[in-house]
Image (cartoon, helix red, strand yellow):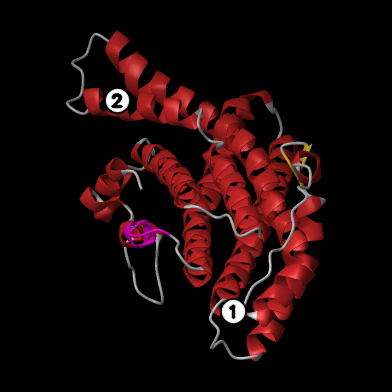
Amino acid sequence: MTSALVSRVQNSPQRYSRFYPFHGARKPLALLLVTLMSGCATTRVTQFHNFSQAGSAYVKASQVVLDEAGTAAIDADSLISQQGRDALKTADERRKSITTSDEELRERLLILREIGRHERLLQSYFETLGALADSNAPSTLGTAAEGVFDSISKLSPIIKNASLGGVKIENRIPQATSFVVQSFKVKALEKELKARSAAIEREIALEEAAFKVIADNLQTDLTVRLQLQESQEVIEPYASPDALPPSWPQRRNEILQATVAAQSAQSAAEAAGKLRESFIALVENRLSEPSISQVIAAINSMLDLVQQIQKASPTK
């Protein structure tokens, strides 16, 4: 495993602690990542446990991206509404405009919430799969996995048919990949994978598609906000004859860094893609240490994106 990546998460655990509440406590994500990278996946049980934990880490990080996507959508719409308010001459026009905007935002936030639910159900499935890999796993786990999958399959059509920013999520789903389930000593696990692994691959692909669309919207919404912030907090103060505020260099750096980070909004979709590739490799008994490290690196990119966005927040 890449030592630089291990060093990075070990030396800055505080920046991850808010993203990864684990088993009811705020266990730092950094500790989980170091645990995942501490050894090779030499047994099938270890492979399934490592994948389960990587999947859980992905879900926790992407939940924060979903929150930021909702906030960015509201902020961008508020700025646009403020700038266009003077063109609306009557109270009825202004009332209709803001009511329509509020309704559209409610619909978008509801879709983001459903995507979050879908992720959490996938996390439960991954955890159940990890538990099934143990030869001492109770027989009821197979029933539990089926129950979780049933909940996932009921929710996925809502997401698949949804649109964000005029783009239908279904249109961004990657093509299915053919793969073969390898034999396992734990027959309950083998039975579960043969029954549902192809369908689960499609559910992870749905996550990937959803975040492709979310990323496009997030980048657009952030650009609207950051351009206004740059004008108000960087350009205009510099052009003014008045003395620059002491915070001007820091705000300039934060806003410009966030502007660059916004161009990398696809990191969440890339993380979902890496997770999907790792799941296929897991089922085919070829999951490697580099595969897990790629998921972790993508999660780090997601957290970097969120950190830069939050630094440039106008409420900071």
Relative to 243, 31 lies left or right: right
Q: Is residue 272 above or below residue 140?
A: above
Residue 94 location, x and y as percent? 69, 37
- Which residue is painted at 31% across and 61% down in the image? 31
Query: Spatial distance from mark 2 to mark 1, Cα to Cα?
Result: 49 Å
Look at the picture and state if 79 lies above or below 287: above
* Residue at the image point whose x is 55% and y is 84% from the top: 135
Which amino acid lies under the numbered mark 2 shown in the image of this protein? Asn
Query: In this orientation, which residue lies closer to the viewer: 106 or 145?
Result: 145
Circle 2 is placed at which residue position? 253
Whether residue 170 can be seen here:
yes
Q: Residue at x 53, y 88 (%)?
A: 136
Disc 1 marks which amino acid? Leu
Instruction: Name the residue at 41% across, 19% down.
Output: 231
Q: Position of residue 243 (x, y in %)?
A: 18, 16
Which residue in the protein does label 1 denote?
A: 132
